[in-house]
Image (tube, coloured by chain):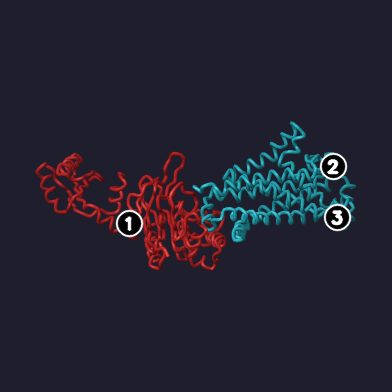
Amino acid sequence: MWNVAFAELRKLRRPTLFLGTMGAVIFFSALFSSLLFILIDSPQGNSDRGRMVGREVLGLATGGVQGFTSVGGFLGIIALCVFAAQTAQEYTYGTLRNLLVRQPGRLRILLGKFIAMKLFALVMIVLSAIVSISASVILAPGAKVSTDLWFGADGRHAIFTTFINVTVSVIGFGTIGMVLGLLLRSPISAISLGVLWLLIVENLLIAVKNSWENWLPGAQLQAIASGGAPSGRSAGIEYSHALLVGGIYVAIGAAIASLLFVRRDVAN
Amino acid sequence: MSNTAISVTDLSKKYGDQVAVSHATFEVPLGTICGFVGPNGSGKTTTMRMLLGLITPTGGTGEILGESIKHPAKYLPRVGAMIEGPAFYPALSGKENLNVLATLGGFSTDRVQHLLEQVGLGDRGKSKFKTYSLGMKQRLGIAAALLPNPKLLMLDEPTNGLDPEGIQEVRALLRSLANNGTSVFVSSHLLSELELISDYLVMLRKGEVVFTGKMTDLMLAQQPVIIAKSNSEGDLVKLLAIAEGAGHHATIRDGAVHVQGPADWAQVFNQAAFDAGVTLSQLTPQLPNLEETFFEMTGEK
């Protein structure tokens, strides 16, 4: 299993993928966090979906990670795309047969790939945390936001819990990407279906009936990233509920995809 | 310890109502080169995939290097394979592609450069796979198959896309591997190549094994052939009738009549053709080559 993980890391570290993804993470983390402070007095809002986050909120112990929380869902979408592409490309390139000849334990292949992609996602999350918190620290004085509480005991606790929540959420999104990659066996289909569902279909469904927000997978994972706190459309989702429902979605999807992967003939 | 590299009994694979491989039974002795031939769609690749644990047989049993094909993890570390052409990650270099597979299989990456040189890619290892020509991709596929220093090498059409020099190099490489104790199971549509290098042969037709055994046994069992040519198309039909009238099996192929019969019947055939007013431009008694035998046994052409 570790051999598979190390082999997968060799693929994930290729410059176009690694630097491209990390570049996007840096850019959007800086953007999301900067807008919070630059647009702090804007009547159109300074956070996602036009939400207003004032000086009082940003001055709390959790203020330093507001930007990081906002970018959490976006990191999830990136993870979904990377996990889906890395899984489905084995079918489109025909490289799955090479993998299985060198490592016939199919579950080991899945677990090894999952571990490697989790590490990749972890690097993304750490980088995003550093960039968004740094941007917040740099821009806070100019926006007249106090940073006194950000790095006290409560502030450090907020950073830690946000980091865990974002990590759980991103891994959840990534697992869904991996499941889609295994089921659809095509990177383009897996990514388009995943992104389309999360960014468009779920929003339409929630617009039609607000209570569906409590049962849709993307909404649960976004709610986990924001710790169940009011953030965009996940305003009404309890953290524990999101964790349970999101966990069930991810577990069922992973079980079905693993079963198919183990049993399906590799005929391409 | 078993002295067979591959041994299968009644191996079958069905997709719905369609039979891909039907009750295939054959053995490949250790340390030999075994050619695996059959027309397109005869089940060669499906058989290889079953032997590598990629697809599950619907019936029958098999052993690779003394281990059941139900437990590929027990024998695959000693098997190198290239199935249905080389498949690698386009954005990685040839060398990095091999490093990925070496890491995956738990092999040392120290051998990678040596293998690249062995297949003639020593100076192109750092180029991305997507920039390789078909022949270079094929060479990289062979290098990947050699990664585990295999006891058994299974290659599906390894000479596809190679130039004559490359084909000769692959032939020499396979012979040298076999001489050093590696068993080679190789499919190819270039039957003349297999004829040159194979000790054993397994021949498939519509999923069924039509011949398995030593190459020499197959060739000796074949009837000699007399090939007769005439400048006129109509004369070929007359020659066919003369041969069949004399009780010989004959076919028209590639602008010539191929008659099964002993070499000394050529004289009688020549006389009969002359009496029928046919002028022969060529009359050659010869033993059939693998290609002719293949067509004869598989009913192709």
Cα separation, mark 1 vs mark 3, equals 77 Å
Q: Mark 3 points at which residue?
A: A155
**Circle number at residue B213:** 1
Closer to the N terminus: mark 3 or mark 2? Answer: 2
Chain of the residue where label 2 is placed in the rendered structure: A
x%, y% of residue B153? 44, 60
Instruction: Chain letter for red, please.
Output: B
Which residue is found at the position 33% from the left and 49% from the top?
B210
Label 1 crowding class (10 Å Cα cut-off): few <14, some 14-19, many 20+? some
Residue A114 vertical position relative to residue A215 in the rendered view, above or below:
below
Q: Colour of chain A?
A: cyan
Q: Mark 2 points at which residue?
A: A52
The residue most toward the left is: B275
x%, y% of residue B167? 38, 59
Closer to us: A44 or B223: B223
Q: Which of marks 3 and 2 is in front?
A: 3
The quadrant in which the C terminus of chain B is found is: top left
Residue A249 vertical position relative to residue B262 in the rendered view, above or below:
above
